């Protein structure tokens, strides 16, 4: 009987500490990834090759994103994303969805609403690797191997984005 308790405890510890879906956690969540994404998020930080480009992003594109579960297409593929430009209070419409079964890549497309000043992957479709997804924080990055040349950035450019839920 004692061996059963010890074995159960070991399995439980492996499950709790070894199965985090995202590199930076959280280790366990009782809410689905989709439920954690839904809501309004503030753009806290944008790093391009580790250089802070947050103000450039806010001036050109916006400061808030609202992820909804409203279907973007009639067939149910993707969901509506609203992003607000806090310089002039305009709100534009985009698309978001999880790009794989394990929900560790989120695709964000703001190009459906014509926008003239995208910054790298921000403003065009891209699959962002989710590093952290909690109820109040989302950390995303684009790996250099996912990079698309026409963004006018060198191939080895990295983009890191932090969002905080409002």
Image (cartoon, grey):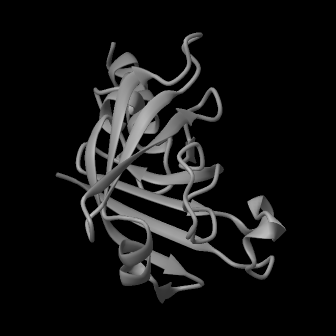
How many dots with numbers?
Answer: 0
Q: Residue furthest bottom?
A: 51
* Residue at horizontal 58 percent and vertical 65 percent from the top: 116
* Residue at horizontal 50 percent and vertical 24 percent from the top: 72
* Residue at horizontal 36 percent and vertical 73 percent from the top: 58
* Image x and y of residue 17, in percent: 42, 44
* Image x and y of residue 24, in percent: 43, 57
* Image x and y of residue 64, in percent: 29, 56
Is residue 9 visible from the viewing direction of this image?
no
* Residue at horizontal 36 percent and vertical 82 percent from the top: 55
Q: Residue furthest left?
A: 166
When the figure is inspected, residue 76 is found, relative to residue 36, above or below; the finding is: above
User: Position of 123 compared to 83: left or right?
Assistant: right
Q: Nearer the viewer, residue 18 or 7?
A: 18
Q: Within the image, what quadrant is residue 157 found in?
A: bottom right
When the figure is inspected, residue 151 is found, relative to residue 138, above or below; the finding is: below
In the picture, which quadrant includes the N terminus? top left
User: Position of 97 compared to 59: left or right?
Assistant: right
Is residue 38 visible from the viewing direction of this image?
yes
When the figure is inspected, residue 80 is found, relative to residue 133, above or below; the finding is: above
* Image x and y of residue 150, in percent: 80, 68
Q: Within the image, what quadrant is residue 85 found in?
A: bottom left
Q: Nearer the viewer, residue 161 or 2?
A: 161
């Amino acid at each position: 009987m004692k061996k059963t308790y010890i074995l159960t405890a070991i399995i439980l510890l492996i499950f709790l500490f070894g199965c985090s879906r995202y590199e930076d956690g959280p280790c366990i969540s009782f809410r689905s990834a989709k439920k954690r994404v839904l809501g309004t998020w503030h753009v806290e930080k944008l790093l391009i090759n580790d250089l802070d480009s947050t103000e450039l992003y806010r001036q050109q594109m916006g400061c808030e994103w609202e992820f909804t579960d409203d279907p973007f297409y009639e067939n149910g593929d993707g969901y509506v994303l609203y992003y607000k430009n806090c310089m002039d209070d305009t709100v534009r419409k985009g698309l978001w969805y999880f790009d794989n079964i394990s929900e560790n890549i989120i695709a964000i497309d703001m190009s459906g609403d014509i926008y003239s000043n995208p910054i790298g992957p921000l403003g065009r479709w891209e699959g962002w690797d989710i590093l952290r997804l909690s109820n109040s924080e989302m950390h995303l990055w684009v790996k250099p191997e996912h990079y698309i040349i026409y963004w006018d950035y060198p191939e080895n450019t990295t983009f890191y984005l932090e969002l905080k839920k409002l």
